[in-house]
């Protein structure tokens, strides 16, 4: 019996020493349960120890449940984002703002070229060209010329002479779908 009292006193001293070094004042429920169970006055047997451990576990479980609820509420709030439907705004006609928005690009210079045809030459053939040489192109006579704007095909047409200068009469404008196909 004396050994039991000595062990209880030793356990109480350990608990007190842990409280002093921890600095928390015994706020941890597990440490409180251990200290109370090991002290001779707070004992009462295995039932008291079991109750204190159950209370400590219940406190920990309650804290975990609260954290889970908070996380669930935060997750629900983040899923409830609402956005304004802009469909009607996009379909509504604008009062002359379209013209104003495009005015700033009207003065941008573009490189427009008309292509009669193409061919490939070797450097040797190029060096042998002289005045009066004829270069055979890949297009037949009467085929439409191709009109390029900044290197992109936008139209086809036929050659005309206006005031002793060449010009191109547009006969076919390339559709946006055909332009996209040419990019690929």
Image: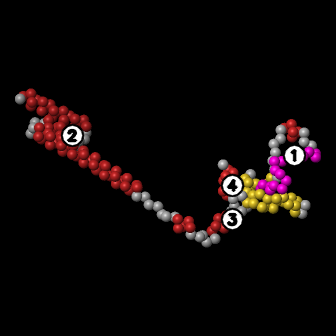
Q: Earlier in the sequence, mark 4 or mark 3?
A: 3
Q: Earlier in the sequence, mark 3 or mark 1?
A: 3
Q: Nearer the viewer, mark 2 or mark 1?
A: 1
Q: Which dot marks residue 135?
A: 1
Residue plotted at (73% across, 57% down): 154
Mark-to-mark CA distance, 4 and 3: 24 Å
Q: Which dot marks residue 163?
A: none
Q: Is residue 136 left or right of residue 148?
A: right
Q: Which dot marks residue 179?
A: 4
Q: Label 2: how many residues lie within 10 Å, few (<14), some (14-19) or many (20+)?
A: some
- Tell me if residue 41 can be seen: no
Label 1 sits on a secondary structure element that is loop
Residue assigned mark 2: 30
Front-lying residue, 184 or 45: 184
Q: Position of residue 54 (x, y in %)?
A: 18, 43
**For residue 4: magenta?**
no
Residue assigned mark 3: 103
The quarter of the picture where the N terminus appears is top left
Which portion, as a residue range, is magenta?
131-147
Front-lying residue, 48 or 116: 116
């Amino acid at each position: 019996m004396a050994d039991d009292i000595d062990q209880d006193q030793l356990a109480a001293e350990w608990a007190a020493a842990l409280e002093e070094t921890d600095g928390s004042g015994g706020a941890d429920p597990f440490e409180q349960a251990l200290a109370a169970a090991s002290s001779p006055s707070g004992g009462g047997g295995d039932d008291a120890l079991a109750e204190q451990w159950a209370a400590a576990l219940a406190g920990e479980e309650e804290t975990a449940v609260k954290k889970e609820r908070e996380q669930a509420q935060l997750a629900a709030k983040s899923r409830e984002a609402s956005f304004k439907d802009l469909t009607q705004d996009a379909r509504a006609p604008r009062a002359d703002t379209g013209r104003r928005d495009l005015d700033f690009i009207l003065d941008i210079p573009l490189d427009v070229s008309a292509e009669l045809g193409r061919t490939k030459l070797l450097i040797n053939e190029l060096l042998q060209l002289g005045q009066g040489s004829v270069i055979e192109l890949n297009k037949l006579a009467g085929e439409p010329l191709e009109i390029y704007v900044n290197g992109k095909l936008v139209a086809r047409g036929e050659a005309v002479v206006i005031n002793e200068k060449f010009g191109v009469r547009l006969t076919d404008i390339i559709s946006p779908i055909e332009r996209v196909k040419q990019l690929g």
